[in-house]
Image (tube, grey):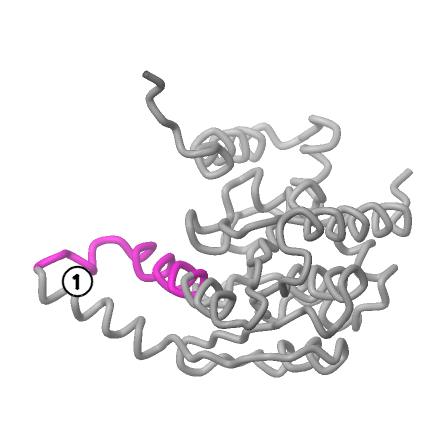
Amino acid sequence: MFDANKEIDGIVNWIREWFSENGANANAVIGLSGGKDSSIVATLLVKALGKERVVGVMMPNGEQADINDSRTIAEFLGIKTYTVNIKSSYDAFLLGLSQSNVDISSNKELKINLAPRLRMATLYAVAQSLPNGGRVCNTCNASEDYVGYSTKYGDAAGDFSPCSHYTVTEMLQIGDALGVPKELVHKDPSDGLSGMTDEDKLGFTYAALDKYIETGEMEDEELKKRIDRLHKLNLHKLEVIPAYTR
């Protein structure tokens, strides 16, 4: 039986211990997308470190329809925030590639993945700007990681990852137990980049995926093959960069 409150205590203690060894006075820096994961993880950071040591960063790419959700969690927690619009950098980057004769039109994922990589660069820049330094928080969960629903060196990066071993189903329970606003915890998950929900884009629900991860059970054989294929294709995102050993 999953005990959300017990897990919260474990995560909070782990965050405190990690910072005691990797930046006793440093701030935790987190991107606030307005979605469940960043909202829940930001709340855990405040519980562990206090609101004075948590910095939220909002990074719209031009206009972001749900940016008020990012503001909602920041105000709920009372944390300091920065808003860095990445559109000028994003557009300049694409223009530079195009002017260098790089084909940016043949693969739409190129443009989709560029934004989270620029956002991660932004988070590290903000972290380095802080007087006591900052440590960038990864907000991925186990369900997304299992099928590679993250951008390598984008939202899949970070200095520490409090919730990467929890499924979406478990994250929802943690969010509710923490008292995070329900409209954020139970918001339809979306990458904010493709114009689709996560589940529409993946082709299956997180509930079905989580059951398969936890039990190995999947009634739909074609869906099982799809999930297995995605998992195998994206394992490289979970591994430390391979290096030749002399």
Identified by mark 1, the residue type is: Leu
Residue 184 falls inside the magenta stretch = no
Q: Residues within 10 Å of mark 1 (few under 14, many from 20)?
A: few
In this rendering, would 185 be left or right of 101? right
The magenta-colored residue range is 101-120
Q: Which SS does the magenta portion mostly show?
A: helix
Task: Residue under label 1, please give it.
Answer: 97
As rendered, which of 29 and 120 lies closer to the eye?
29
* Residue 112 screen position, x and y as percent: 37, 60
Residue at the location (45% across, 79% down)? 84
Instruction: Say what secondary structure mark 1 lies in.
Output: helix
In this rendering, would 172 be left or right of 28? right
The residue sitting at the top extreme is: 246
* Residue 137 screen position, x and y as percent: 59, 57
Residue 109 falls inside the magenta stretch = yes
Task: Give the tally of numbered discs.
Answer: 1
